[in-house]
Image (cartoon, grey):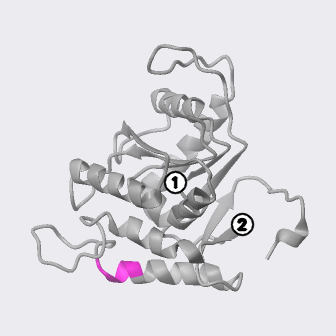
Amino acid sequence: MQLDLLVMTVHPDDAELGAGGTIAKYVAEGKKVGIVDLTRGELGTRGTAITRAKEAEHAAAILGVSVRENLELRDGFFINEEESQLRIIECIRKFKPEIVITNALDDRHPDHGRASKLVNDALFLSGLRRIETADKHGVAQEAFRPRLQLQLIQDKYIKPDFVIDITDYWDIKERSILAYSTQFNSQTEDDEPQTYISNPGFMDSTRARGHEFGRNIQVKYAEGFTARKILGIEDIFTLS
């Protein structure tokens, strides 16, 4: 399956938090969109790898993505080395996405920036024909490099290079986040400790960030992204 857009992020829920509205928007427009999680999020304070997998499946259904996979790299301990790069290269050559969105360049969580660099390096290497990979059936894959890589803006504020109006898709984004019931908006007593993101106030800050980005283009909600390169446009009259 060839994808138009692939969101490749390190933890289940990163895609929803940073790009859930954008994913829903392009799904609604008929684009083929997929999510690939690099790890199972097994080091998370709340929940387990098994519950996170079920929640990720639920969130994917809410967003309507064409595919969601997990590369099962080691949460917290993955490194930017050949084995991890090859796993990502195989995935990129499998889906041949036009655009890839990955984690923030720099963030409070050290996995985010590290994953962003790993994916960036693997995307470049994926375009080199002398790096040989095969699919699960042993069939050789062709070299492929996406046209564009973008980064989320996550917990740490980074000035976006552009923002996307997601006003019509905010409800879908929020429902996809709350599909991770072990992680967010915990208002009941349980045996697990409260965390930075499980406190109900975290969702308030997420909405505030959406409002903040939206205000810059006079809409209710928006999501912001950064690019490693200067972006070109064909028509300045499409800018808002």
What residue does disc 1 label?
Answer: 113
The answer to whether residue 234 is seen in the rendering is yes
Pick whichever, 185 or 119, lies toward us: 185
Residue 225 x %, y %? 64, 64
The secondary element bearing badge 2 is classed as loop
| Magenta run includes residue 202 | yes
Q: Is residue 7 left or right of residue 187?
A: right
The secondary element bearing badge 1 is classed as helix
Residue 79 x %, y %? 44, 39
Q: Is residue 185 left or right of residue 221?
A: left
Residue visible at 82% across and 72% down? 239
Q: Quadrant of residue 187?
A: bottom left
Of badges 2 and 1, nearer the viewer stands 2
Residue visible at 34% across and 69% down? 178
The answer to whether residue 43 is seen in the rendering is no
Tell me if label 2 and label 1 are in contact, CB under 8 Å: no
Q: Amino acid at mark 2?
A: Asp
Judge whether 108 appears above or below 36 on screen: below
Residue 154 x %, y %? 51, 66
Which one is earlier in the sequence, the residue at label 2 or at label 1? Answer: 1
Q: Which residues are magenta?
A: 199-203
Q: Separation of disc 2 and disc 1 at Cα?
A: 17 Å
Judge whether 122 appears above or below 185 on screen: above
Secondary structure character of the magenta stretch overall: helix
Q: Within 10 Å of the Cα at label 1, are there few (<14), some (14-19), or many (20+) other Cα atoms?
A: some
Q: Quadrant of residue 185?
A: bottom left
Pick whichever, 145 or 173, lies toward us: 173
Q: Quadrant of residue 144?
A: top right
User: Can you say which quadrant of the picture contains the C terminus?
Assistant: bottom right
Q: Amino acid at mark 1?
A: Gly
What residue does disc 2 label?
Answer: 161
Residue visible at 58% across and 79% down? 221
